[in-house]
Image (cartoon, grey):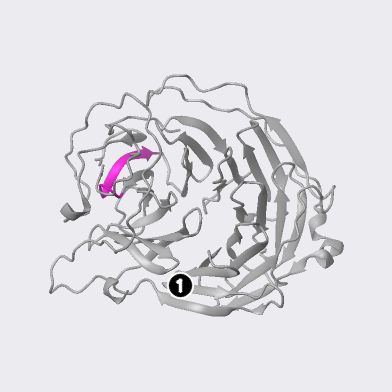
Amino acid sequence: MATLSAYSSPAAWPNDNPNPAVLLQQDSTTGDEQQQLDDPQSYDSLSSITPQENHQPDPLPQSPPSNPTPVTNYSSPISSPPESSSSPPPSVALLHLSFNQDSGCFAAGTDHGFRIYNCDPFREIFRRDFDRRGGGIGAVEMLFRCNILALVGGGADPQYPPNKVMIWDDHQSRCIGELSFRSEVRAVKLRRDRIVVVLEQKIFVYNFSDLKLLHQIETIANPKGLCEVSHGAGSLVLVCPGLQKGQVRVEHYASKRTKFVMAHDSRIACFALTQDGQLLATCSSKGTLVRIFNTADGSLLQEVRRGADRAEIYSLAFSSAAQWLAVSSDKGTVHVFSLKLNPGAKMNDTSRAITDTNHAAGSPASSLSFFKGICSLKLEPPPPPPPALIGETPRLYLSSAWSVAQFRLVEGSQYVVAFGHQKNTVVILGFDGSFYRCQFDPVNGGEMKQLEYHNFMKPEGSF
């Protein structure tokens, strides 16, 4: 359960004036969600990135904020100055890697702060280093290319408590609000209109403009913080683990309907959602099969096979037009699969148990107060899974498609993959600091061609 207390805000939060010199800030108080903003500053005046500790809050806002400010000046890196010219730079360990919503940028959380990079062309955009002796950031979630990010402390010496989500405005280089919980935050997902916070066994959905709690979802144990949300212009589609092993829950907020899909007979290890939320790719802890479902009715559309041996799947990614699917695993190979999808046709009408549940008809209260208007959508528990899943039968094994293209990396290392903005390219990020851009042949397939390599954890001057 989370409660909310408010600090202060600007005239509009996040700011809708696309002026990269206008900024915002926060300090730490009690409560489960908190928000604070301060006087405008400019990047030119910043000499320290450490959040202020004794800031007094201004009055609460009188109107809901508007859309976040797009960051348009990405031409040069911005970083914290070194403590002294004679001090050697501290060693930095990676704690987190993630792409933004369109895979045009990626964020790296380290044991000293966080960094933001552009993918095409590759370059470091900026970094925020908090403290040589700590400042760990265990999760960084971008909101496309705007100034707002969500941060969660992590590592041996976290910058923030791991049970808090800090809303960071990089125009002000400080936090403007926070959400606090009774257990550690496993993941955060951002949309322009929603903040989704994932705990071990619960998910909270908040309205971005006023941090009002809109929905609570209970899940099976979810230590990886598995959760995906759609990012298209339409209504929110949210996917998370269900209440049973191998089960996926799909929330359609426009129609106020919930679907439970028995995707696998083993624990769900990873999944991905298309931008519009219409297609879902899932894999289990076995790591051999990836299944693609239609989120509208839960039908199985296609099944692809990574390999015959067990593997831990690290990431799944759809291409922008859902023509291709990329998969990375601990086997050290990134696979690209061709998808032949027809959402109106089902691979096997009896292959999955799917249930629909209508959301309760309750609606949020009209007040925009930070303390009121909490709405909980109650759902009936899902039915038990069928005795056996047809997904493991030899017939479906033979119908599983193998990858079209592959790129081989170091086995055992962890990599995150996405499709590049250039045609037929993938971008691969490694927790060893590696950045690869590769191209695949959509007709002949085979080994991908490496186009580019960088070590993004090298000192800033090397870029």
Q: Is residue 29 left or right of residue 366?
A: left
How many numbered discs, if any?
1
Q: Nearer the viewer, residue 124 or 76?
A: 76
Percent position of residue 116, x then y = 37, 60
Percent position of residue 365, x then y = 48, 19
Q: Nearer the viewer, residue 306 or 22?
A: 22
Q: Residues within 10 Å of mark 1 (few under 14, many from 20)?
A: many
Q: Main secondary structure of the magenta part?
A: strand
In magenta segment, residue 2: no
Up/down of 60 relative to 440, above or below: above
The quarter of the image holding the N terminus is top left
The quarter of the image holding the C terminus is bottom left
Percent position of residue 296, x then y = 71, 42
The residue range painted magenta reads 170-180
What is the three-letter code of the residue carrying label 1? Phe
Residue 96 can be seen, yes or no: yes
Dot 1 corresponds to which residue? 435
Residue displayed at 28% across by 71% down: 460
Residue displayed at 48% across by 43% down: 191
Residue 83: name its quadrant: bottom left
Where disc 1 sits, the SS reads strand
